[in-house]
Image (cartoon, helix red, strand yellow):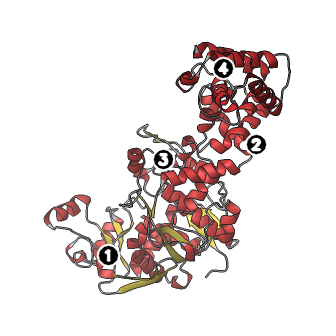
Amino acid sequence: MKDKVRVRFAPSPTGGLHIGGVRTILFNYLFAKHHNGEFILRIEDTDQTRFVQGAEDYIYSCLKWCGITVDEGTREGGNYGPYRQSERKSLYREYAEKLVAAGHAYYAFDTSEELECKRQVIENFRYDHSSRKQLRNSLTIPHEAVESLIREGAPHVIRIKMPEDEQVAFHDMIRGDIAFHSSEVDDKVLLKADGMPTYHLAVVVDDYLMKISHVFRGEEWLPSAPVHILLWKYFGWADEMPKWAHLPLILKPDGNGKLSKRDGERFGFPVFPINWVDANTGNKTEGFVEAGFVPEGFINMLAMLGWNDGTDQEIFNMEELIAKFSLDRIHKAGAKFDYEKAKWYNAEWIKASSAGHLLPQVKPFLNHKGINNIDDAYLLDVIEMVKERCVLLPDFYEQASFFFTAPVHWDSNAVKPKWNTGKDAFFREFADQIKDKNDLSSAALETIFKDLATEKGMKVGELMLPFRIMLVGGKFGPQVFDIAEKIGITETIHRIHNALEAFK
């Protein structure tokens, strides 16, 4: 192990950041901070054909919302920059040429049309040890001719020369010892014709130069591991190779395959942290933020997808996750995504959060519904009163809109079957008794209400539901006398009289 723990997340700016990527970021971050290490963000933008405008900004926005800070990166700087691969382009050819000189890579001059012809003729065609001798490359073309082609600027790529009969083994911190047979891997392109490196070359060179100590990535990268292991060996860096951890997949709710953006659209839940709008197509994908998640609930949910601390504890803040995170508690099997469980985590964090913490997150959802210019002190009290009933942030509107606007529709069907003139008279007299009393507390209102019911020989229980529906419009909300205190005596009386007309 290197002296200093240094981990990195290296996304391609080709689109929105899937929650699988965010979990990889999170596990990197938790491991680094647990070991007092550093978290690096490196942008792998070598495939310029797939570059999407705004993708890097989006990644940073997601990290900010999640509460994950970057120690070194494209915006933070650091001692090992640049941290954007397109700005490191001049580095990679030098390393690719070293591999060619050492006999571990070769120039390939085949055109895309020539390779496509091969695929048409040869079923499951691969550019590998079995086919390379029949193709146009520096293994089949005389040395002088190769040099001439390069001098003339002939388009070419550099491919790794995979050994024909070799076991490539390494230890994975999650999966244990893993071995691949080299003959099962094709000769991957390392340097493209435009001089840009492929992922395989760039990731090894950059991890070495940036002194990365541990690599966390999804298990879908396992098939690439033998190429990367060999590159570390061929460069003479085997002793400095990072330790590997291939994370389990996040699976569809039914467990059948990797969770995708399309699954979110199909099942009706987000798979990106924040709304993603594709600059090229204009397509919009809803995020967890817009669905009404708080960052603490989102992070807690993600951490528990494939990891636990070995106890029954399910609710963790970031500090607890950092303190308790360990690789031996990461599961090898994929983790099913359960949206109902995700919402449960969110509800627990809403309950646990102070009204002051929730205030700036709740306001936009109320504003969206036309509730604006709310006094913060008033809203803080309302949030405190209803947060136990909220699962997602939009629920604050559903659970609290009556604090801001009087109902215009009432659940009369819940009242009318047992409604009578006696109840009508009770509420008119109750309204009359409180009209001259300012700033009545919830307890005082309850006392007046119950004393009047006793005087009239009526059951309090049969009066409570009509009173709630008068104030709220339906059978929900916090303690009804607390509602009356909050909206005030004048508004309470106004709502009683409006509802009495509707109950006739």
Q: What residue is drawn where x is 42% and y is 64%? A: 198
CA neighbours of label 2 inside 10 A, class few (<14), some (14 to 19), many (20+): some
In the structure shown, which secondary structural element does the residue marked by tag 2 occupy?
helix
Residue 198 can be seen in this image:
yes
Q: Are marks 2 and 4 in contact (CB under 8 Å)?
A: no
Find residue 497 and report its horizontal and vertical position in percent.
68, 14
Bin the neighbour count of mark 1 within 10 Å (Cα to Cα): few under 14, some 14-19, many 20 and up: some
Mark closest to the chain's N terminus, 1 or 2: 1
Give the Cα distance between marks 3 and 2.
27 Å
Q: Residue at x 55, y 27 (%)?
A: 414
Is 428 placed left or right of 412 in the picture?
right
Mark 3 vs mark 4, CA separation in Å = 48 Å
Residue nearer the viewer, 98 or 400: 400
Foreground: 241 or 469?
A: 469
* Amino acid bearing label 1: Val
Q: Which mark, by number, is residue 247? A: none
What kind of residue is marked 2?
A: Gly
Question: Amino acid under label 3?
Answer: Pro
Q: Residue furthest left?
A: 121
Cα distance between the residues tagged 4 and 1: 82 Å
Q: Which residue is mark 1?
A: 185
Amino acid on which disc 4 is placed: Lys
Number of the front mark, 4 or 1:
4
**Residue 314, picture quadrant:** bottom right
Q: Residue at x 76, y 42 (%)?
A: 356
Can the viewer see residue 44 in this picture?
A: no
Where 249 falls versus 238 (above or below)? Answer: above
| Residue identifier under label 4 | 423
* Tag 3 near tag 2, CB within 8 Å: no
Seen at 61% across and 49% down, the residue is 347
